Image (cartoon, grey):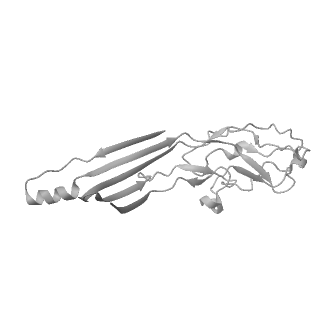
Amino acid sequence: MKATAIWQLPTYKSSSDVGRVVGLIINDWQLSSVWTASTGSAYTAAFSYQNGGGNVNLTGSGDFGARIRIVGDPGVGCSSNQYQQFTAAAFQGPLVGSVGLESANNYLKGCFQSALDVSLARNIKLGGNRTIQLRVDMFNAPNQAIITGRAASLTLTSPSDPVTIVNNQYNADGTLNQARAKPQNAGFGAANAWQNPRTVQAYIRFGF
């Protein structure tokens, strides 16, 4: 989804000397904006074993892989809690003897994404074909922090223990794993990427 809007700011008129100076400063500005939005992308949780987790070990074939098991309700795949975008406990590793049909594809869905970019510009005529444009662009003007990525790969030790999560975001007692509090160290189920924060650029363009 995309929408655009342009507003020519009202013109200020005055017969006084001060008013004319004010008019020269504030008149002829144009405000424009672009709003871009999209529904969340579908994604799938993955797994890896640190030892003995190759295709041959699990399915008996090097050409066919196993899939992560879903043993509970994983949730939608998007949450206001950055540390729990989906329910990590709803997943377990595949077992030896897998036929590769433990779960489907794209059963999780990311968050709705929205971005508003705003621009304020003014063209000043210098005579002939010469103009100067003053412009300020603001990207992601509301400075929204919408989650765009998640740690969706479950790490386990070996097929003999398909339950204990190595890259856990929460400890066994339910407290946050402080070693994974930062996004770059995000545990299974936590957010690890956001849309770009607000950025502003300003420039002067001379046309002739």
Identified at 76% across, 49% down, the residue is: 47
Q: Residue furthest right?
A: 60
Instruction: Provide residue 35's location: percent of width, then percent of height.
Output: 43, 44
* Residue 98, picture quadrant: top right
Say whether residue 30 is left or right of residue 101.
left
Quarter of the rendering occupied by the C terminus: bottom left
Q: Is residue 93 above or below residue 181?
A: above
Q: Nearer the viewer, residue 108 or 138?
A: 138
Residue at the outermost left position: 16
Going 14% across and 50% down the picture, which residue do you hit? 13
Where is residue 198? Give x, y as percent.
44, 56
Q: Farthest residue toward the front?
A: 128
How many numbered marks are there?
0
Q: Is residue 144 left or right of residue 153?
A: left
**Residue 87 coordinates in the image, percent (x, y):** 66, 44
Quarter residue 171 falls in: bottom right
Measuring from the top left, give residue 18's x and y in whole percent. Answer: 11, 60
Residue drawn 66% across and 52% down? 151
